[in-house]
Amino acid sequence: MKKLLLSVAAAIVICVQAEDRLKYEVASIRPANPKELFVRIEAGAGGSFHATSITLQQLVMSAYNVRDFQVSGGPQWVGTERYNVLAKPEEAEPPLPGTSSRATFESRAERERERLRNLLKDRFQLVIRWETRQLPVYALTIAKGGHKMKPVPAGPTVLQGSHGRLMGKAVTIDRVKRVLTDVLGRPVIDEAGLTGSFDFKLEWTPEASPSADPSQVLPPAGESLFTAIQEQLGLKVESKKGPVETIVIEKAEKPSEN
């Protein structure tokens, strides 16, 4: 009898959680202007979500906090057809004060991602599965002579970047890894084993865009990113293959009418 009561209680909890899932109260999904190719994603006041000229693949990336190389599968249109999305939550999120901790900001971001995931399930009938694949990655290790970042006490993290420049204050190696993943366009895995927080400054000469006008491209005047990481941070980035968590789209349908 006791086991039966526990099973019933568990079922009730599961049902309540399903009903209490975070979602948007109002959501508009419309085909974008085919001539508009500039993608814009905005997290608005109160937890609203606004995206312009975005594909389902890009929505999946935003909803699950992954990069493009981590998403595959689905019909061809998931990466080509573009939509304008405007959604507002049932209950507006309160404004976050500037003194909020990183954990508070991360919790807020995860709630917003959960709403978006549920929107994709409801309107695109999205079904995904996670799959670990062996993909090209970069391994982050400590260079000969040791790292050159400045250890500091844990505190508010500041991470600022521009074209060819990156500055961090009280940044963990995990944040460094994630930023380098964005810059290098390939997963960066941590094999340095560093703990704690660090201050650092990184400057390098970015590679010219393939579409740039050759007559306007100046010859490199500084270090490449890989050289700068080793010389300025005392870290090495080595190419190898490693396990990467990826998303496979098993099912997707064009969105239902608003």
Image (tube, rainbow, N blue to C red):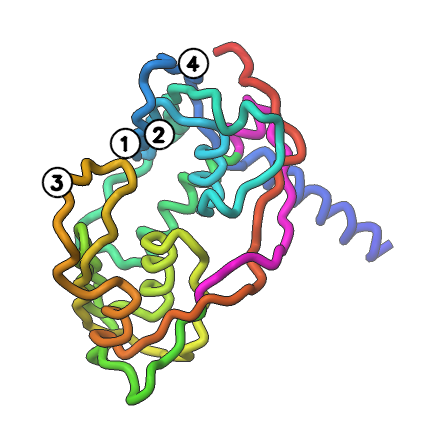
Q: What residue is pinned by disc 1? A: 44
Between label 4 and label 1, give the one nearer the viewer: 4
Q: Which of 90 and 257 is in front in this view?
A: 257
Distance of mark 2 from mark 4, alpha carbons? 14 Å
Could you tell which of marks 2 and 3 lies nearer the N-terminus? 2
Distance of mark 2 from mark 3, alpha carbons? 38 Å
- Badge 4: how crowded within 10 Å, few (<14), some, or many (20+)? some
Q: Nearer the viewer, residue 125 or 236?
A: 236
Classify 6 as above or below 144: above
Residue 171 percent coordinates (x, y): 26, 67
Q: Would residue 194 appear left or right of 240 to someone viewing this image?
A: left
State the mark number for residue 216. Answer: 3
State the mark number for residue 49. Answer: 2
Q: What residue is pinned by disc 4? A: 30
Q: Would residue 218 appear left or right of 245 to someone viewing this image?
A: left
- Badge 3: how crowded within 10 Å, few (<14), some, or many (20+)? few
- Residue 243 falls in image quadrant: bottom right
User: Which amino acid, mark 4?
Assistant: Arg
The answer to whether any part of residue 116 appears in the image is no
User: Which amino acid, mark 3?
Assistant: Gln
Residue 33 percent coordinates (x, y): 35, 12
Distance of mark 4 from mark 3, alpha carbons? 39 Å
Range of magenta residues: 118-138
User: Which amino acid, mark 2?
Assistant: Phe
